[in-house]
Image (cartoon, helix red, strand yellow):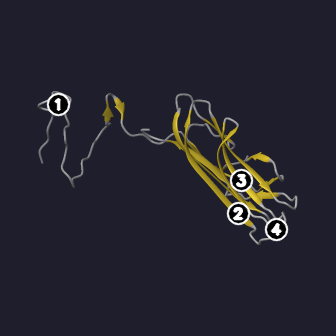
Amino acid sequence: MSKLFVDEIVHQSSQGSGTITIGASGETTNIVGTLQNNGAGVGGDNTPAFYGELASTQTISRNSYVKVTGLTNDEVDTDTAFDGTTFTVPSGEGGKYFLYASIQVDYEIAGDDGEEARCYIYKNGSEIKEAKWRVTGSHVNRYTALSVSMTATLSASDTIELYTLLNDDSGADARLLENATSIGGYKLIGV
């Protein structure tokens, strides 16, 4: 095996503006060290990133928009920006983010008529994404699961939260189940 020691490789005919190919199709090219593009590192680690699951069952009052709190189980918080309820974009970390949330509802304490569930991602106190489910009339579905995901452009100090609205025509409350209700997100690289 031979080694090539150089300080700079420049395309022969264009003096810096052409394409240089390293390796051939089917080969593996191993880069040791830091790969850069005009002095900036290439790649990344999809941070800030956050995630939390509901740590205990939460009873939700009928027909009210409620912020889900206590999302502290299996928590991920790479930049100390998620407090188990609210993710706040850290300074200098604005950009495109992938966000996702889910709820699982237990209607055991509700009736069996007109159940409704909604799962919201909120940005700065307002809804930006929603999933909803509603059944009218009698049915036997005790559990309902909803999920929502999206990409969003976020700026430093923007906040992300999980909200829900649960309803039952009989006037009863319902519960969000722990470990199945969650929110998370991460910054996208290169977009």
Q: Of helix, strand and loop, which one carries label 4?
A: loop
Residue 156, percent from left and from top: 58, 30
Between residue 55 and residue 88, name the one nearer to us: 88
Q: Residue at the location (19% across, 33% down)? A: 18
- For discs 2 and 1, the disc positioned in front in the rendered view: 2
| Mark 1 residue type | Val
Circle on res. 165 = none
In the rendered image, the vertical position of residue 136 relative to residue 11, given as above or below: below
Q: In 3D space, how far apart are the residues under numbered discs 4 and 3 (Cα atoms)? A: 17 Å
- For discs 2 and 4, the disc positioned in front in the rendered view: 4
Marks 2 and 4 close (CB-CB < 8 Å): no
Marks 3 and 1 close (CB-CB < 8 Å): no
- For discs 3 and 1, the disc positioned in front in the rendered view: 3
Between residue 7 and residue 21, name the one nearer to us: 21
The answer to which of marks 2 and 4 sits earlier in the sequence is 4
Q: Quadrant of residue 137?
A: bottom right
Residue 85, percent from left and from top: 69, 43
Q: Is residue 69 left or right of residue 23?
A: right
Q: Residue at the location (15% across, 29% down)? A: 14
In the rendered image, the vertical position of residue 51 relative to residue 48, given as above or below: below
| Mark 4 residue type | Asp
Q: Residue at the location (19% across, 28% down)? A: 16
Q: Residue at the location (27% across, 43% down)? A: 31
| Mark 2 residue type | Thr
Circle on res. 112 = 4
